[in-house]
Amino acid sequence: MDKILPLQVHVKMADEAVCVGPAPTSKSYLNMDAIMEVIKKTRAQAVHPGYGFLSENKEFARRLELDGITFIGPDTHAIQAMGDKIESKLLAKNAKVNTIPGFDGVVKDADEAVRIAREIGYPVMIKASAGGGGKGMRIAWDDEETREGFRFSSQEAASSFGDDRLLIEKFIDNPRHIEIQVLGDKHGNALWLNERECSIQRRNQKVVEEAPSTFLDPETRRAMGEQAVALAKAVKYSSAGTVEFLVDSKKNFYFLEMNTRLQVEHPVTECITGLDLVQEMIRVAKGYPLRHKQADIPINGWAVECRVYAEDPYKSFGLPSIGKLSQYREPLDVPNVRVDSGIQQGSDISIYYDPMISKLVTYGSNRAEALQRMEEALDNYIIRGVTHNIALLREVIIHPRFVQGDISTKFLPEVYPDGFKGHKLTDLEKRELLATAASLYVSCFVSQQVEVDGTKLNVTSEWNLASPLLPVTVDGTPRTMQCLSRDAAGNISIQFLGTVYKLRILTQLAAELSKYMPEKVEEDTTSILRSPMPGAVVAVSVKPGDMVSEGQEICVIEAMKMQNSLIAAKTGKVKIVHCKAGETVGEGDLLVELE
């Protein structure tokens, strides 16, 4: 057995593991030669490609076929046809699948992108032809945004897929993102396994998914399913795959793309249908016909998936965070919870891969039950050492619009137009938090009355202060909190209702004296540019002595294969540039200073 890296769950679970290369994906998971060598060395008979990397790469599937290795996925023709957004759109039209108006060729340069965008009519979506997962996608509302979108999308596409070709299509405002799971075999059979609602997104990447959708009626569901199967049969599709649609407010639906692989959100489909999609993929790859008919596919109950990320949700709804998981425990004690993860306590979250920690899935007999279990699961999920997005996830699933099913792909910017700020405490919740913090300060373990703003509350708990979870009942209301830190000076950090609150508990004398303490002077952030996330510097657009205007691009940082343009906060002259293209930077690193 080759060198095994410590604390990797997939390595720990495997009967045999071989290191395919160093962390950069171009030298490991995207290195076909290295992977083919491992296949040869281990005498593998078949390869399941997983979710990303080479899973939709026709050349990888072709090389496996030439070596007599079974690819647990569709054949190279289907991968090529559906993996290319331009070709797939033409095939969809021929299969009588509803498609979005747009340009069906490859866009050559920024000037042509502007010309095409004007012909289609703004807004437009610029997207990587070979793309997926939200990478290489930009919305443009005018000529300037089209030029900028062309530049960033082509760079991201080249970085993520090794293919910088782009296409442009009409952007449908306020759509829902609803996808149909399909399953086909090598004997011409194909099924649709109902839909998944994936409208809660940030930067065109899904955050919360559920099955079924609150929006579809049986007729629309059937129409979408039949079109998805028609497309699958048009390319003789044999495996699990997903046909993605945009659906407008009148239930008109349009083909978006087909993912010729297993989706990250596939567990919610497994929950409501009872099918094991990976098992079905293996059976199909072996040559067996499908075991089910369309009439056999049920919708039993409701399932919700939250993508738990190592991200800071207070920055653009989630900029990547890196670090070591100093403490980690999944909420598997909550009924009907499934957690698909690849990490454990002690694991490192690095800049090289997607920052997803896990797929947290809950199941119920109905939607309300599934959501209630998700609340409980999020409250009981222990993650320390990295910033995470549990606060955002919890706020989404309890928001009245989400609960009512009133959602679109614009949900996050519409609900939080000024950015996500965490949970806004009601007066009662604030009293509950303060009463619990006060009880913690005096280390009360049984029951006591706490007075907050003239109101007395009964706090009951038998908590163990060594445990990260604090089950507490305040005036009869059970809560699960987490104490993240506390010190002798009365500083306490508590995770309550998903959001972290920092409090300071003082004696009356200490409170009276605290007004004499000097306040820390805040840093003037308008004259400096710090990196908002860990990543790699792709480009630096200025040098010392240059004059820059407010809003002008200073540099571009790539994190988890997404490119982010960093801009000047004010007009001024560049004093010092502390970074250069190719360098790796950490969150908070100083990049540029202005005079």
Image (tube, rainbow, N blue to C red):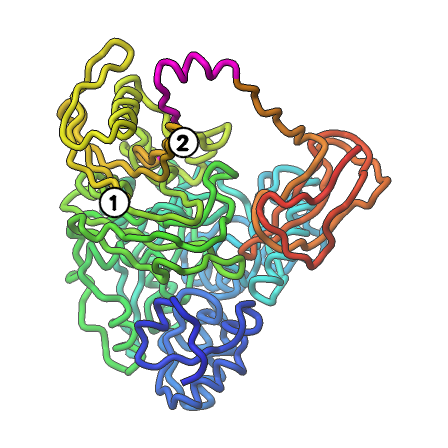
Asked whether 336 or 452 is in front, the reply is 452
Q: Can you give x and y, in whole percent of width and height, for residue 80 in the image? A: 50, 71
Q: Name above or below for residue 495 compared with residue 285.
A: above
**For residue 292, which numbered disc appears in the image?**
none
Q: Is 149 a magenta residue? A: no
| Amino acid at circle 2 | Gly
Tell how many labels: 2
Q: Residue at x 27, y 60 (%)?
A: 192
Q: Which residue is mark 1?
A: 467
Q: Residue at x 35, y 55 (%)?
A: 358
Q: Residues within 10 Å of mark 2 (few under 14, many from 20)?
A: some
Q: Can you give x and y, in whole percent of width and height, for residue 35 in the image? A: 48, 80
Q: Earlier in the sequence, mark 2 or mark 1?
A: 2
Farthest-out residue, right = 545
Q: Name above or below for residue 241 compared with residue 177.
A: below
Q: Is residue 253 visible?
A: no
Asked whether 268 or 77 is in front, the reply is 268
| Snapshot quadrant of residue 215 | top left
Q: Which residue is mark 2?
A: 422
| Amino acid at circle 1 | Ser
Secondary structure, mark 1, is: loop
Which range is magenta? Answer: 499-516
| Snapshot quadrant of residue 347 | bottom left
Q: Residues within 10 Å of mark 1 (few under 14, many from 20)?
A: few
Residue at mark 2 to residue at mark 1: CA–CA distance = 24 Å
